[in-house]
Amino acid sequence: MTQIESTDVLVVGGGPAGVGAAMAAARHGAKTLLIERYGFLGGVAAHGMGMPVNQMRPGGQSRSVVHEAVLDAVFAYGEEAGSVVDHALVCNVDYLKVAIMDALDAAGCRYWLHTPIVGAEATDGRVTGVTAATKQGLRRVQAKAVVDATGDADVAFHAGAETLKGRPEDGFLSPMTLCFVIGNVDVEAARAYADNDEEFVELLARARKHYPLVPDCLILEKTGFPLRNHLAINHPGTRALGTLDGTSVEDMTKAEAYSRRQAVQIVAALRRFGPPAFADVQLAGTAAQVGVRETRRVKGGYLMTEEDAAQGRRFEDAVAWRSGWLDIGWVRWEEMKVHDVPYRALLPERLDGLLVAGRCISATHVGASAGKSMGNCMATGHAAGLAAAMSAAQRRAPRELEVAALQQALRRDGVDLQWAGQNRP
């Protein structure tokens, strides 16, 4: 028998966007439930094996009480847990997983782990909840307002919202990458060697003759990884395979199989062909799953574009801003300006009761790439969660809210909506 649960605000997806949404809604007094398919919260920030959580403090300045609550919860565990380097949180992901639960507990937010959704409920064009799969069977969760922070727009898709995917002309999607950690290395010597791009690329080319899955370039994260004698590695991942769709079970299986063999080959190549710094290198750990950069995006009341990012556009209905770099993973990378996120980009075009946050907000292929840094995703989550709480309290559809009142509430939470138009902090 299907069990039924009711709440004011339901947030689906426990990555940075979902954490931001759930914390904001709970802090605003809404009965809030966050559901997550994995056994931990934090999304790629937690399973990215040391990937910096970018744009958490651009220009060294606080973005909001929500961002700071997460940072403070990490710092409470000491220097080995993490620190802010430039704009990014660099952390031991196992401390981060605990810290996020601490921050949500402090905000009074409930959360369920190991709870993937398998459907959404919509009545008369309004989303009223989701169906989740648990070990006890199916569970229906009904809510006054729902936030889709799944990254893949799963709730919106199941509810029948119009979604976009990939580059319009050919369906191209950004490549996926399985990040991993290597250990037993001379960190400083390895970093110094990798700084010589030409020599490092030549090493990878030599190694590829013996280890064909080795990519043509890779990054040794240089932002103060907290584990001694360890380095986190990011790289082009599945780029050589062409377009793979993160919402296709066949493509995800292919990506996982390729990427896990690739990680093993990269480590073997560094040990065999690298300088003495890598002589005894070991594969210390891989991410829980391959990192997906791009899948579905909701078509909303406004579609964010490349021009918005390049020109640093302002919007009257701004509820967040995005900073950093326009980054189509390992395909295109260039500077952009800080630009606003309009409230309309968080609202599906023809579906009520639902807000979206994170990388599935309404944007073009390039426009989406300008905002996928995790601190930016948390900011749109903050706005969506606060709007959901206000919607539930006022018994009004999210699109019926007074945007000025939402902006005022965001300002009370420490959000400065005057950054747009500036060069990257």
Image (cartoon, helix red, strand yellow):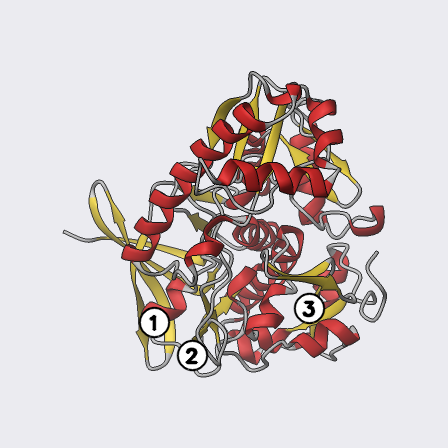
* Label 2 or label 3, whichever comes before in sequence order: 3
Residue at horizontal 34 percent and vertical 71 percent from the top: 159
Give the image location of residue 279, x and y in percent: 58, 18
Which residue: 32% across, 50% down? 254
Identify the residue at horizontal 84%, vertical 56% (top origin). 425
Give the amino acid at mark 1: Ala
Tell me if 263 is positioned left or right of 24 in this view. Answer: left
Give whichever of 335, 140 is nearer the camera: 335
* Residue 319 numbered mark, or none: 3
Residue annotated with mark 2: 351
Q: Residue at x 39, y 76 (%)?
A: 161
- Distance (Cα) linking label 3 and label 1: 25 Å
Question: Pointer 1: what residue?
Answer: 159
Q: Secondary structure at mark 3?
A: strand
Q: Quadrant for residue 89, please give it.
A: top right
Q: Position of residue 156 (x, y in %)?
A: 40, 69
Q: Is residue 214 above or below residue 133?
A: above
Q: Identify the mark nearer the N-term, 2 or 1.
A: 1
Considering depth in this image, is 410 or 278 the residue closer to the camera?
A: 278
Closer to us: 257 or 394: 257
Residue 171 location in percent, x, y?
44, 73
